[in-house]
Amino acid sequence: MQSLEAELESARDLAIDELADAIESIGFECTRCGACCTGHGEDEHTATVFPDEVRELEDADGESDTVPEPDERDWRDVARPMPYGLEERDGDLEGETFEWALQTDGCGDCVFYEEDDAGVGACVAHDDRPLICRTYPFSVALAGTSQPMGESVDEEGIVRAHECEGLGRDISREDAEELARGLKERAVRELEEAIGVRDNYEPAGSTAESVVVHDSEGAKRIDGTPIEGETRDLSDDAHGTDRN
């Protein structure tokens, strides 16, 4: 297996045209069914969101019954600790985990998701949605990058497609290229984040916090504030990614 740094170089070398070719070959059109934004059975919707994306969503336009207006919104309205590795005790979560997930409502759906009377879904923060939402149902087959919602159901070259009723539909070249650019950016960002988590990780040890979240900026409380020391913001690195 290659190092994360080697995988990052591979991600930076991804060719937009080749990714777009693969997406065109598989085919996709969003049907606004909401399956990628909602919980399934007892499982809450769980989509990874990075620290800089949380901050963007805190200020994003749009509101719903489950998310406040931007000037009243804070970290916990947008994100929750990734549940993996946490245990529930007396109704409260305890433990250490890595990264953040989009916040969910009482039904287990993303708080930014809403449906109209006809059951057609929409994201109230569509223009500011995280990279994983912009690029679903696709991923790239690089170690250190996420493979959302289980195993792939189709693939073309390095591009994987995950379960979605919109697969196999015609897609314009323009839309395929837009998806391809987002897919490359996401792969680079995920690997930068993984390297940051690895380099900044220190076991929580003795702490008054019941939940500790480790991300690329260090250890944080459930409200996104650093537990100790200064944090490092990788958003400039992500925004400087070569998207050509």
Image (tube, rainbow, N blue to C red):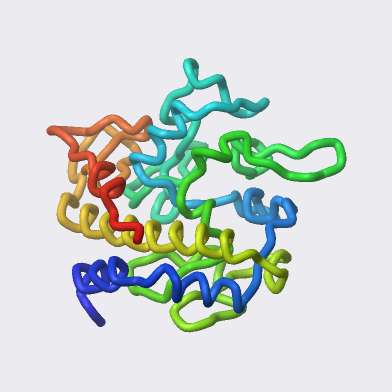
**Count of numbered marks:** 0
Relative to residue 33, is residue 199 drawn left or right? left
Q: Position of residue 121 (x, y in %)?
A: 73, 44
Residue furthest out toward the right: 118
Please state if 135 lies on the left or on the right of 4 as rendered. Answer: right
Residue 6 picture location, percent across and down: 21, 73
Query: Relative to residue 60, is residue 153 depicted above or below?
Result: below
Q: Nearer the viewer, residue 166 or 147?
A: 166
Q: Relative to residue 62, is residue 188 drawn left or right?
A: left
Q: Quadrant of the C terminus?
A: bottom left
Q: Is residue 225 above or below residue 145?
A: above
Q: Is residue 139 left or right of residue 186?
A: right
Asked which quadrant contains residue 154, the reply is bottom right
Counting from the top left corner in percent of width and height, residue 172 is at 64, 64
Q: Residue at (25%, 82%) from the top-left corner? A: 1
Q: Residue at x 46, y 72 (%)?
A: 19
Judged from this view, the residue extending furthest toward the left is: 229
* Residue visible at 55% across and 70% down in the picture: 150
| Residue 73 percent coordinates (x, y) | 48, 22
> In this orientation, which residue lies closer to the viewer: 231 or 70?
70
Q: Nearer the viewer, residue 144 or 161?
A: 161
Residue at (28% x, 66% y) in the render: 12
- Quick one: which residue is furthest to the top in this view? 71
